[in-house]
Amino acid sequence: MDKRFKIWPDYSNCIANLPNSIMKYFGVDTVGETLPLLDKYLDREYKNVIVLLLDGMGINIIEGNLEEDGFFRSHLAGQHSSTFPPTTVAATTSILNGKMPNEHAWLGWDCYYPQVDKNITVFFNLEQGTDKPAADYNVPYTYTGYENVFDRFQKAGKVAHFVAPFIEPYPNSIELITDRVREIAAGPEKKYIYAYYDEPDTIMHKTGSFCEDARNMVRNLEQQVSKMCEELEDSLVIITADHGHLNTRGVCIEDYPTIMECLVRMPSIEPRALNLFIKDGLKEQFENEFNKFFAEDFVLMTKQEVIDSQLFGTGKEHECFRGMLGDYLAVATGDLTIFNTKEEAEKFISVHAGLTKEEMEIPLIVVR
């Protein structure tokens, strides 16, 4: 752990370990270490093992929005760590393939791909900040494609299902998500069901982590999941999150011309984990200017420090990983976030992807 940080991803107790526990339980070949916190609950036969990931519902979110004796907190088995960065692209890819970000190279919302020399919004294969396709093929899947858990289950002759708003039949509410899980769970075969829902992340980005809208959303999630669990039989249900959330102050990097003139391209990865490419001969100016404005809220790491620290993971590096990294990585440790545009700085109230306790710590809620 780098001494400049108060918290660090725990890659022996993190979201990348969780799917390896599931695969081991079903007799599917694993790709990494298991999650000891979960392993002790996989001690008997279940017809259904269900993982429900609620985007953004970190430990701080359930503690700040829910009653201590409510369903989620009363079934809290413990906490584990997100990946770095603690963000949806990196962490949900880890739960989908059992690998760490340095292994799968889906590092954040926007990633630099040296093969096309562009920052790309990876989930949509678009050039960063535009509606323009990155290429006439899917760049992320071409260069950083991966075998997911469901592929591995199929190869092993086991049954696994994926439920999400972007997968047919496109359940776009927690009520429809839980209905779909119940429908699949009713089948007679032994199976793994992984379900993802994009709340409370979406509402918290807009309104903050602990406002009335966020609290109502988290309470409804708890109510609907509790109802689902009451109606299931012979099932182990695991509820977790990909990351937590933090209310922050937003600024726009374009308002700092002495920093902007040093950049080869706009920052990538995330606004709280800025991947920065610097023009030749301007590294000293960049360091001085960046630290002048942001040293209290960000730690500036060189590319080599990032690699040596194993911040993105301790596994075998993806062949693209190092080429995707800039000269520096600026990691948020305070409540300031540096966006690429003023619109984003004004729009997002609560965010994630930095190295704080609020962003890194996620729950493992277990219901037998």
Image (cartoon, helix red, strand yellow):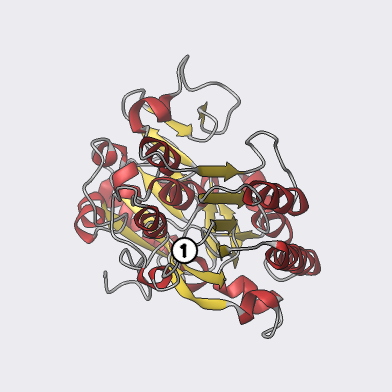
Quadrant of image for the C terminus: bottom right
Q: Amino acid at mark 1?
A: Glu
Position of residue 182 in the picture relative to residue 326 (left or right): right
Q: Quadrant of residue 306?
A: bottom left
Count of marks overlaid on the render: 1
* Percent x, y of residue 78: 48, 77
Q: For the residue labelled by badge 1, is the local secondary structure a helix, a strand or a loop? A: loop
Residue in view at x 68 percent, y 76 percent: 71
Residue positioned most to the top: 136
* Percent x, y of residue 148: 41, 40
Residue in view at x 42 percent, y 25 percent: 139
* Percent x, y of residue 322: 24, 41
Residue in view at x 70 percent, y 75 percent: 65
Residue to which mark 1 is pinned: 45
Quadrant of image for the N terminus: bottom left
270 lies above or below 204: above
111 lies above or below 46: above
Position of residue 314 in the picture relative to residue 330 (left or right): left
Residue positioned most to the bottom: 69
Residue in view at x 40 percent, y 39 percent: 157
Position of residue 128 in the picture relative to residue 325 (left or right): right
* Percent x, y of residue 297: 45, 67
